[in-house]
Amino acid sequence: MGPGARRLLAVLLVVCAPARLRAGEPGDGCGHIVTYQDSGTMTSKNYPGTYPNHTVCEKTLRVPKGKTLILRLGDLDIESQTCASDYLLFTSNSDQYGPYCGSMAVPKELLLNTNEVTVRFASGSHISGRGFLLTYASSDHPDLITCLERANHYLKTEYSKFCPAGCRDIAGDISGNLVDGYRDTSLLCKAAIHAGIIADELGGQISVLQRKGISRYEGILANGVLSRDGSLSDKRFLFTSNGCSRSLSLEPDTQIRASWQWVSEMGEQIHWSPDQAQLQDQDLSWAAGDGGKNRKQREWLETDLGEKKKITGIMTTGSTQSNFNFYVKSFVMKFKNNNSKWRSYKGIANNKEKVFQGNSNFRDPVRNNFIPPIVARYIRVVPQTWHQRIALNVELFGCQITQGNDSLVLNKTSPNTVGSSEREDETITKSIPSAEIPTGINVTAVALPLVLFGLLVAGMGIFAALRKKKKKGNPYGSAKAQKTDDGKPCPRV
């Protein structure tokens, strides 16, 4: 291969390679970032571990026009004392805040006069340092707190605060549960997500009641947050809510059915029927008839509430039987009313069908809340992934529809409504990709070769047109095919 060919090959390899292979992504020093319309959370990479050497994190934060930004620094730990290569800086069109680093005095809160600011965090060579954690919100939320605030930071017995979007995955423990309350050493916003008071994607206002502590706090997995068991404390806290959280599963007009049921043979036939799927029952759960993961039909468990109701949450367990280690690891929700189509419950931020985290063993309950709530009569749990065999016990939470709380419209999608799908009932029987199987396509990897192919085809077309023009303008040409020196016809292009 000649030098010219090698150079051409190198150029093609560079052009065809995905961008992430040619250079580092912008913001390679950024860590956890969650943003929504008017609040969010941002950290340096590896936080609260040591931030990496020689990286830059740059992100522009915005709130709606007509509002101004509030920034709160929950943590800043940068090794440099000079801010020459390691620093945190905020810039807007008219002002600059920082750079901040080392042991200098740093304001915990910045009140900006703009709705947009660029955050820049740079690092050089260093040995230690956690980096930073900040939260932001619009001027509508002057009571903004960070994800690191704990209940024992406050002395009042009752207070209200605004939690930003994105606190769920910030490091820090919580102990307790929605019913008994939380140990006062727990992170406030993380506990509010666990309790189903706010959604991590949105953030929101929380109202807190401080009470006398209890001897033991029982942990549970809820809304993607694992609460741990906790020991005696002087104080605990609870959240006030709208009261729409009582059990709907034991009401007399509630009926449960399923797509299929399993009949096991253990000396005698044992029916794992859907009428055993109520969480309060201590007997067998419902189990699907086929444990295979390649079934074309997705199994489902349906609850008929007798009338349209407001559903705010669900609790699930597996088989609850130690000798039958069956449980559902993830599921989606479908709902409908009389003579309407089945609709999928969707996430607020991305408007895609939401996949809920299920159980991790056959025994321990897991709770998930619906924010916003579902208003419907019929509810289906559609398992997506499971261990060995589909097995479910369920309990639905909510309340009756009353004047003033039936404001949700099923066929709209907004922060105040439940997302919907226009699919009919039969879509539930079609194969749905498992949450464990990636189905995305690398657009960069596909698009660039297609562009090159298009250029190649276009070049061939231009070349053919030039040849054709040349033949027409040749004074020695004729209607017959031109011949080569050996008398053979020239190949047509």
Image (tube, helix red, strand yellow):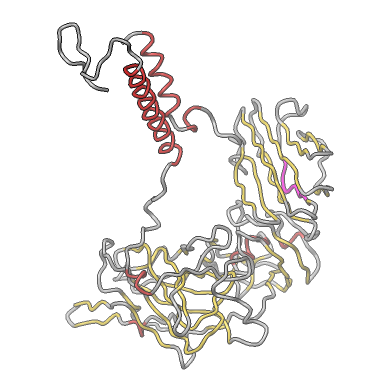
Closer to the camera in the image, 391 or 112: 112
Q: Residue at x 64, y 81 (%)?
A: 405
Please indicate whether residue 225 sits to the left or right of residue 211 in the image. Answer: left
Q: Magenta stretch: dominant SS?
A: strand
Picture coordinates of residue 109, whole percent (x, y): 81, 49
Q: Is residue 139 above or below residue 79?
A: below
The residue positioned farthest toward the bottom in the image shown: 252
Please indicate whether residue 485 sits to the left or right of residue 71 in the image. Answer: left
Closer to the camera in the image, 128 or 16: 16
Q: Residue at x 39, y 82 (%)?
A: 282
Q: Is residue 135 above or below residue 378?
A: above
Magenta span covers which residues? 70-77
The residue positioned farthest toward the left in the image shown: 487
Q: How many marks?
A: 0
Q: Residue at x 66, y 87 (%)?
A: 403
Residue 142 location, quadrant: bottom right
Q: Quadrant of the N terminus?
A: top left
